[in-house]
Image: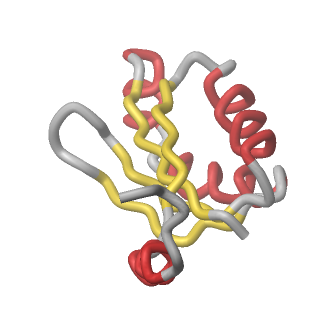
Amino acid sequence: MPTYVLLTTLTPEGRETLHKTPDRLIAVNSEIEALGCKLIAQYALLGAYDFLNIIEAPDNETVAHLSIDLGARKTATFTTFPAMSIQALSSKLSGKSHLAR
């Protein structure tokens, strides 16, 4: 399955919810999986983003659905990036180039 990075920023409502119910962090993982995604790694961050989640999903549409569903709660905003392994990129770069030099 393709890999995606989700950078999450909590809204004021999200910070309040998390402060009152810290277990909410783990509960969201089940919701991610219920939408057909697999959580690979999850980190809390300091700085412009509050969390970094690495997930696998069947396709872009599934990740968009996930971001819209979670974002509709108004507790967080998401910046989502497709990601690839260094090995996959290296393999692609090792192939014949179709560009004229």
In which quadrant of the rendered image does the N terminus lie?
A: bottom right
Query: What residue appears at the point 38 percent right and 27 percent down from the top-left corner?
Result: 15
Viewer-proximal residue among 1 and 48: 1
Image position of 80 with respect to 15: above or below? below
Q: Nearer the viewer, residue 57 or 21?
A: 57
65 or 15: nearer the viewer:
65
Q: Where does the image place residue 85, in percent across and percent down from the top left?
A: 46, 74
Q: Is residue 84 left or right of residue 30?
A: left
Q: Residue furthest left?
A: 47
Name the spot of residue 70 as percent of width and height, x first: 66, 32
At x 38%, y 30%, the residue is 9
Percent coordinates x, y for residue 49 in the rendering: 29, 36
Task: Judge left or right: residue 68 versus residue 36.
Answer: left
In the figure, 22 relative to 54: above or below? Answer: above
Quadrant in which residue 30 is drawn:
bottom right
Q: How is the image coloured?
A: secondary structure
* Percent coordinates x, y for residue 83 in the rendering: 49, 58
Q: Residue furthest front?
A: 101
Q: Residue 16: name its quadrant.
A: top left
Residue at left 41%, top 19%?
Answer: 11
| Quadrant location of the C terminus in the rendered image | bottom left
